[in-house]
Amino acid sequence: MGSIIARAHSCQIMVSGSSSQLWFVGRKSDVEVADYLFAVMHRAVEKLSWKEYATYYYKVQDEGDVTRARGYRASFITGFIHRLSQRFEEEKRKMYNDPTGTALVRVNKEAIAVADYIARLGGKRTLNALSRNSRTHTDGYRRGQQVANDLNLNANAVKAGKANAQLG
């Protein structure tokens, strides 16, 4: 999720090789937004995934087979993150269609500056956290996508001064 949020906010991430720490690299204002959004989204997906898992677990328990709940939560998170990534890309495409062209120029300059900085540090470490699970729970994945699709990603949802009601 960190790399998705970083890309959406003209940043990149650096990952510690010996821990799960990550850093956002970019302009100070972009890093602040990405850092805040990452914290909010991380807490939200954890909370939502456990809530959705419990709902599904009790449903399949009533149907007599709790083993059907195996993998639901992990697939929910994967579906959520994939849909979130798609939505950020859709928003970026809308920005590229800006008739003035100023948004595209700003984004390209920021991306180039961040890539140059990372290169001067000796390269970029990548991490593909979504590839760890080869089995997908279809219901969990679909539900994760639905929940991510219903989130408000507008700028005022983050800058409003109080937590987004959907995420809190």
Image: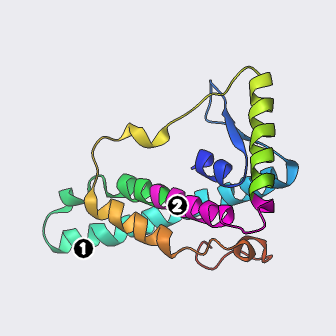
Q: Which mark is residue 151?
A: none
Residue 58: image location, x then y, percent: 27, 71
How many circles with numbers are drawn on the protein?
Answer: 2
Q: Check residue 83 for magenta coloring.
A: yes
- Residue mark closest to the camera, 2 vs 1: 2
Secondary structure beneath label 1: helix
Q: Does residue 107 sit above or below 161 in this rendering?
A: above
Question: Does the stretch in magenta take in 89?
Answer: yes
User: Residue drawn at (55%, 73%), measured in percent from left and top?
Assistant: 151
Is 152 on the left or on the right of 63, as rendered? right
Q: Which residue is mark 2?
A: 84
Residue 102: % across, % down: 81, 61
What residue is pinned by disc 1?
Answer: 59
Number of residues whose C-alpha sits closer than 10 Å to that of mark 2, classed few (under 14), some (14–19) or many (20 or more): many
Q: Nearer the viewer, residue 109 or 57?
A: 109
Residue at point 74% right, 56% down? 104
The structure residue drawn at horizontal position 28% and vertical position 66%, both measured from the top left corner, is 57
- Crowding at dot 1, Cα within 10 Å, few <14 / some 14-19 / many 20+, comes out as some
- Residue at left offset 14%, top offset 63%: 65
